Amino acid sequence: MRIKGEDVLLPTTMVGSYPRPNWLRGKVFGEFDEPDYIDYGTKEAFEDAVRLCVDDQIRAGFDVVCDGQQYFESETTHEYGQVFHFWGHRLAGFKRWGEPIAIELYKKFHAPMVVGDIEWVRPIFAPILEATRAAAGDRPVKLAMQGPLFLAFAVTDRYYGDPKSLAMAIARAFNREFKDLTARGVDWIQIHEPLTYYGEEGWYLDVINTAFDGVDAYKVWHICYGNQGGNPGVQEPRGQDMFPFAFQANVDQIHIETMRRGPGDLPHLAKLPEHMDLGVGVIDVKSLVIERPEEIADRIVEAARYVPAERICVSTDCGLLNLKREHAQKKIQALVEGAALARERLSR
């Protein structure tokens, strides 16, 4: 894969979220017409937390670093609340309140309510990118965020009355945000879309492709099996249904988990289009057990049976925020060591 203009075999990164330090608590950002940060003390605390998160990734040896979604309230049992509120509380057309989310795994969270035309009105992730870029130096930076389809299925719609119209409006707002981020210098943008929940409808890809239309960044689709409090939302394998359907998406990489679930989805990726890379999750984020580099290498080598190693990116299964920071540190170190071992095996 090409990283900052250089060929890197099996580049390493993580999906997105990371446990934040115990001194960063509660809400970080303002909403609607409020300032970016709720106060300057919180701004400094957030920037320090991002710096620590990025430093952990650099120390581990990651090739691409991310912000760690340090605005998630991971010290609570509502750690993923910002997944649903972060966009909806910053785009025009939403109210802050709504009904419980219909998806069983996330019913304890409320869904923002759509009451008018959805529009992008201000930069949303700009302060996150600014903090991450300052900490990352010259390393490539990835920002990870929930995708437009998932937001459409989670919110309470009191305006559009049609899931596709709602999702397309959200996708157009995402597109404005993504183009703003590329203008600010982001390298990778990753969306989390749990196609495992939805089934396969052709217009789903129209939504993803609209969000990424004309976006000059490396585009990643993390296909999530769910991760609420360390619990999956979908138990049964879905690779046989999702692929090759997902290959029509306007993305540069499709990422799947393979450590917790096993390698069962990999054979269905054997015909991944040549212009796409494969992100292979090799860290079980739902377990406290630290993976051995040897088992990580085994899974990477197995993935290379179906997709050339030159097109594989090594990552975690999903976000790490449900773990203690010590566990997360050891797991990402094991990931890097396992990738190095896999490089040795594949280069023989």
Image (spheres, rainbow, N blue to C red):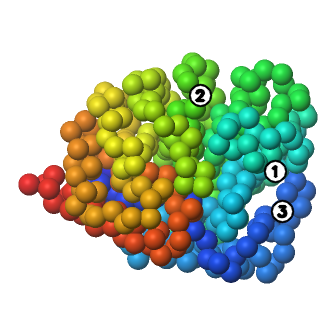
* Measured Cα–Cα span from mark 3 to mark 2: 31 Å
Residue 304 screen position, x and y as percent? 23, 43
Q: Where, by quadrant of the figure, is residue 186 drawn? A: bottom right
| For residue 179, side relative to residue 252 (left or right) | right
Q: Earlier in the sequence, mark 3 or mark 2?
A: 3
Residue 161 screen position, x and y as percent? 83, 22
Q: Where 118 falls versus 129 (above or below)?
A: above
Q: Mark 1 highlights which residue?
A: 90
Indicate the quadrant containing the C terminus: top left, top right, bottom left or bottom right: bottom left
* Measured Cα–Cα span from mark 2 to mark 1: 25 Å
| For residue 347, side relative to residue 247 (left or right) | left
Where disc 1 sits, the SS reads: loop
Where disc 3 sits, the SS reads: loop
Q: Mark 2 highlights which residue?
A: 198
Residue 188 screen position, x and y as percent? 51, 52
Type of amino acid under label 1? Arg
Q: Where 68 falls versus 247 (above or below)?
A: below
CB-based contact (under 8 Å), mark 3 and mark 1: no
Q: Where 26 falls versus 94 (above or below)?
A: below
| For residue 54, side relative to residue 39 (left or right) | left
Q: Earlier in the sequence, mark 2 or mark 1?
A: 1
Q: Mark 3 highlights which residue?
A: 30
Q: Residues within 10 Å of mark 2 (few under 14, many from 20)?
A: few
Residue at 57% across / 76% down in the picture?
51
- Residue furthest to the left: 348
Q: Residues within 10 Å of mark 1 (few under 14, many from 20)?
A: many
